[in-house]
Amino acid sequence: MRTEVLAPTEESIARAAVALRGGAIVGLPTETVYGLAASAFDPAALASVFAAKARPTFDPLIVHVVLEPGPATAQLEALGLVDGARLTPAARAAADALAAALWPGPLTLVLPRAPRVPDLVTAGLDGVGLRAPSHPVARALIARAGPLAAPSANRFGRISPTTAAAVVAELDGLVPLVLDGGPCDVGVESTVVRVEADGRLLLLRPGGVSAERLAALSGRAVLRGATPRHPAVEGGSGLVSPGTLESHYAPRQPLLLLDAPLSALTVLPRAASVALLARDEDPGPAAALLAAATGAAPVLALGLGSDPGVAARRLFAALRELEASGAELLVAEPPAGEDGLWHAIGDRLRRASAPRR
């Protein structure tokens, strides 16, 4: 069975909602990346998501919701997603303030899970990741089908999909249908923060909302550092947030992430063929330097540019193009900045270039 790609008409959204309520999985667009969705309360459907992605069950999922205006936490409790008895007043206030400012949008809040949430969603942990996407197709589908658990619609550890065609390239035949909502506007996954009991925010994954903006909106410092790990996996090295394995978002060929622009480097590995992801809009000068350093003219050179929003939208599609070039070695210059969206872009490139296990 080949995957069917559908234009997001009212009829196809209704058809996808019926499929989800019947226990099927569906590819859907969000503003961040395309997701592989299942009913958040259906363990059998959730298991199908893990099977299609070849995703380990120690990696938690994010539940996508549509909320009405008003305090988010009360609505999440009513949906059976958040345990209000374990939500402190400080955490409730912080979560409601961030949701009011940033939902719908690319922010995931980790809050105390309610008993109704299946263990497969949370990897057995006591917190559940929740977000309200802004993509109109995702919102229309959730409104019809109810809360959806939806990791990125790709094989586990691979480059995230930002178009319906990329979903098919990854999962053709493994997901019955994909709603085509066009290219994703943000291009990198949501920011994941855990709301602590005292209202502080612990950054688990950088993404579409910057840590600086979170700090400004909350009036609190956003704690960074080592991501806490699932205590039951790999001697404490499992995940409490998706997308935080050392190797992730990875192309099939080795990706070399440079620690400085090519103009500052003189020695690079020799390669029969190379492809380049440059930090500047015009990749030509960097491509010439790469050819001189490696002895191989790049078969493909692409540039991210100096605008972080544009760079984020281009990132995963560019990595897929480099992979498709067939080059033996993929080379990426470091991003043009370190804060805001650049933080998320650098995180994705670092994990895409990490040694595979």
Image (cartoon, helix red, strand yellow):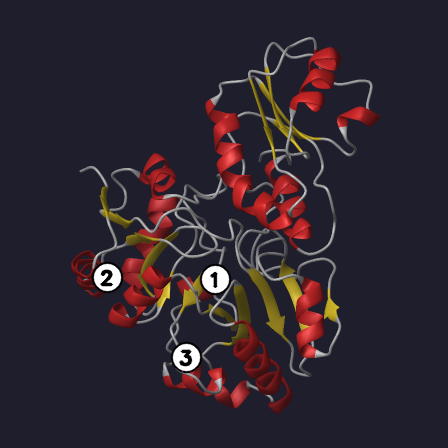
Rendering coords of residue 336 (x, y %): 72, 42
Q: Is residue 169 left or right of residue 268?
A: left
Label 3 vs label 2, nearer the camera: 2
Rendering coords of residue 128 (x, y %): 49, 70
| Residue 20: numbered disc | 2
Name the residue located 75 percent from the left edge and 14 percent from the top edge.
293
Q: Where is mark 3, residue-wise?
A: 115
Which residue is most to the front? 282
Q: Is residue 45 left or right of residue 56?
A: left
Q: Amino acid at mark 3?
A: Pro
Across the whole image, how many numbered discs are drawn on residues? 3
Q: In the picture, residue 228 is in which quadrant? A: bottom right
Q: Amino acid at mark 2?
A: Leu
Residue 107 vs 164, above or below: the answer is: below
Query: Residue 232 or 285: which is nearer the viewer?
Result: 285
Rendering coords of residue 59 (x, y %): 49, 55
| Residue 123: numbered disc | 1
Q: CA gap, disc 3 to disc 1?
A: 13 Å
